[in-house]
Structures are given as structure tokens and as C-alpha cells.
Image (cartoon, rainbow, N blue to C red):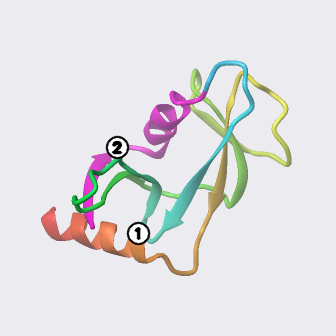
Amino acid sequence: MKFEYEVFNSVPDLLMVASNSFSLGMRQISTMFLYGEYVVFYSPTLSGENEESVWLISMARGKLPIGLIEFDPETKEIVKILKPVNPEKSHFLVVEPKESTILEKAIANYEKAH
């Protein structure tokens, strides 16, 4: 398993990039993970049949409240909410897994290299 990284200076910067992938006017919710000192979004990339899998890890040091949050890309305001109602804003489900072997390996590899 290989990792490629996008590391951001702040959690709002990470959310800004993640919210860019949403279709305008559609209510979409993406998952963000709290793991150790990091807020992380990750996804596998397409690999060839005989190639090692590659995971794209987007991360920033920081914290977010657990649960559903609303992010306003214009003001970079983050608010914990009960349900998404404003399609103009981006929504994320923030979870904190007890254990994640993918995140453990990815963060350990990143910290070892930096």
C-alpha cells in the first residue's frame, strides 16, 4: 500500500478543497476523520491490475467537533449542526474511529518522512 499526501496549513483550507468536489446545489455529505492530531480525508486512487494500491491522503493538523458540521467556504466558518438545510454550504460528517490501520500507516509514513 502506497500513500500520496496533500497537507494543508489549516483545517479550513482542507475543508475548502474538499468542498470544491461537491456539485453545486446538491446536498452532499463527505466524511472527515479525526485521528491523532490530524483531520483527514482519504480515498483510493485507480490502480492497474498488477499495481500496488495508492491512497490519496488529504490532511491538516487540528480538530473538528464530532458529528455533522456545516462549512461556509466564503467565510471559512465551521458550525456543528443537527441536519443539513443550506445547500449553499458544504456539509461533513466528522468521525473519530477507535482504530484505523489505513490512517495509522499513512500518518506514521508521513511523520517518518517529515
- Magenta stretch: residue 4 in it? yes
**Kind of element beneath mark 1:** helix
Residue shown at the point (80%, 27%) measured from the top left: 86
- Which x, y percent locates residue 2? 24, 62
Q: Residue 8 carries which label?
A: 2
Describe residue 15's horizontal placement relative to residue 6 as left or right.
right
Disc 2, SS:
loop
Image location of residue 109, percent across then percent down: 23, 69
Q: How many marks?
A: 2
Front-most of residues 79 and 31: 31
Residue under pointer 1: 103
For residue 11, which numbered disc appears in the image? Answer: none
Residue that sits furthest to the bottom in the current view: 99
In this rendering, the answer to whether 111 lies above or below 56 is below
Amino acid marked by disc 1: Leu
Q: Residues within 10 Å of mark 2 (few under 14, many from 20)?
A: some
Q: Distance between the residues labelled 1 and 2?
A: 17 Å
State which mark lies toward you, 1 or 2: 1
Query: Mark 2: which amino acid?
Result: Phe
Please give left or right for residue 73 compared with residue 48 in the image.
right
Q: Please name the residue shown 42% across and 66% down the image.
A: 37
In the picture, measured across the screen, residue 86 lies left or right of residue 46, that is right
* Position of 39 relative to 92 (above/below): below
111 relative to 54, above or below: below
Please determine whether, in this image, residue 68 is positioned above or below residue 72: below
Q: Position of residue 97 (x, y in %)?
A: 58, 73
Q: What stretch is highlighted in magenta?
A: 1-22
Q: Does the magenta stretch include residue 90?
A: no
